[in-house]
Image (cartoon, rainbow, N blue to C red):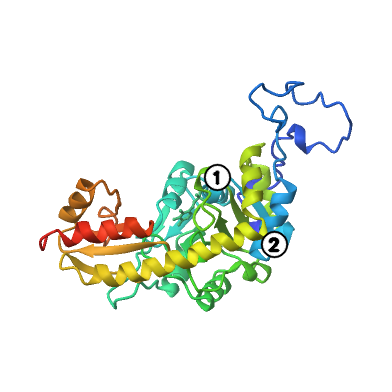
């Protein structure tokens, strides 16, 4: 058995999952094994949605593998990264015993999934006292060794703080905790950063997992399609834990269209424009009297500290602009997170805050 499977919950080691109708090896022309309707819905529009979908739509899986430059056997199609996070916590953490490590302020779903599974949460706060967010990697290694951590979740670029983790640090950490814990790099915003992806490292580190999504750069948040990239043995185990037919057929179809070469090129071009708008917005926000500091960002958002975040939030809301209030997160009591919208959205944010009269 591969070493990474030693980290799996022992009670799941021989678990084969639900033997769904689409998993059968049987081949035929009359399908009577899933209690489906024999004819499509009147609302169907020619999609054959009366049949259960392929649990891992083959063409979509291979297109995603091509996009992220990994082998098909290293990739699982997910209902967004959220499903990947949930499956990982279920697979590797026994309730009340095996901990999840996060570096707050960070994406909230890691802690939510840990909570639902009953897994202890170990928090190792990021430090921004030097003007850039940094993570104490040696402390991560120590926590893994001493606090029963089975899963380490880091996002790169990180939400809401914006910084990307250099690939050498990811490699160092994967090496340092190898055999003890699974390292998960959540790359939801990778397309907005010049930082190289960690996908290629999966071949070298059995306990490294990378999460990607079509929700941000590919503008398909509503379709719920993501990818989990890991060693084939990990993909196999997670497939057994997932829902029987996780990927809705209409979502798979629109994702396939989004992965046609022209669509990918257009999406990446738009990411380039968004990063340019982001950097321009950061510069201009930094000149406003109400703004204390704009954190550098490798994502499609800015983390902005205000002299009075309450007043800024209210002022934006008064103009109909809803930004993310992150003030409850550790160390962010004066901050708001602003997504990079259209040119007009950015102008409206600037005009609204400029009118704020030194708040
Ligand atoms: C937005 C985001 C995701 C995306 O989740 P999906 O379920 O794929 O939509 C994942 N991780 C982080 C850190 C995010 O900010």
| Separation of residues labelled 1 and 2 (CA atoms) | 19 Å
Q: Quadrant of the C terminus?
A: bottom left
| Label 1–label 2 contact, CB within 8 A | no
User: Which element is circle 2 on?
Assistant: helix
Mark 1 or 2, nearer chain start: 2
Q: Which residue is mark 1?
A: 224
Quarter location, residue 19: top right
Q: Quadrant of the N terminus?
A: bottom right
Query: Which residue is at the front of the view, 32 or 24?
Result: 32
Q: Which residue is mark 2?
A: 66
Residue 128 in the image, given as x and y percentages of width and height: 30, 72
Residue 116 in the image, given as x and y percentages of width and height: 46, 41
User: 356 above or below 83?
Assistant: below
Query: Is residue 61 something one can see in this rendering?
Result: yes
Pointer 1 local density, CA inside 10 Å: few below 14, some 14–19, many at least 20: many
Quarter location, residue 179: bottom right
């Amino acid at each position: 058995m591969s070493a990474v499977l030693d980290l799996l919950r022992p009670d799941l080691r021989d678990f084969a999952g639900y033997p769904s109708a689409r998993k059968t090896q049987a081949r035929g022309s009359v399908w009577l094994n899933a209690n489906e309707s024999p004819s499509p819905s009147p609302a169907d529009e020619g999609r054959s949605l009366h049949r259960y979908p392929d649990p891992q739509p083959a063409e979509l899986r291979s297109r995603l593998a091509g996009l992220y430059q990994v082998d098909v056997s290293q990739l699982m199609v997910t209902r967004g990264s959220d499903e990947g996070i949930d499956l990982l916590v279920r697979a590797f953490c026994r309730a009340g015993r095996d901990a999840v490590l996060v570096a707050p302020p960070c994406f909230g779903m890691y802690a939510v999934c840990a909570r639902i599974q009953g897994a202890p949460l170990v928090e190792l706060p990021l430090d921004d006292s030097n003007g850039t967010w940094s993570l104490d990697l040696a402390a991560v290694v120590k926590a893994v060794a001493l606090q029963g951590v089975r899963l380490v979740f880091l996002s790169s670029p990180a939400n809401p703080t914006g910084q990307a983790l250099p690939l050498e640090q990811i490699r160092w950490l994967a090496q340092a905790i190898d055999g003890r814990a699974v390292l998960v790099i959540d790359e939801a915003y990778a397309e907005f950063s010049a930082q190289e992806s960690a996908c290629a490292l999966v071949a070298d580190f059995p306990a490294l997992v990378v999460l990607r999504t079509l929700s941000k750069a590919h503008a398909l948040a509503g379709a719920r399609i993501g990818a989990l990239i890991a060693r084939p043995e990990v993909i196999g185990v997670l497939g057994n834990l997932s829902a029987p037919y996780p990927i809705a057929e209409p979502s798979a179809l629109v994702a396939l269209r989004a992965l046609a070469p022209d669509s990918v090129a257009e999406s990446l071009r738009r990411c380039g424009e968004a990063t340019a708008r982001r950097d321009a917005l950061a510069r201009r926000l930094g000149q406003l009297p109400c703004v204390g500091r704009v954190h550098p960002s490798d994502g499609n958002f800015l983390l902005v500290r205000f002299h009075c975040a309450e007043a800024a939030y209210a002022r934006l809301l008064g103009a109909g602009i809803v930004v993310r209030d992150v003030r409850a997160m550790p160390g962010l009591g004066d901050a708001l997170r602003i997504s990079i919208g259209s040119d007009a959205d950015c102008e409206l944010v600037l005009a609204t805050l400029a009118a704020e009269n030194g708040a």
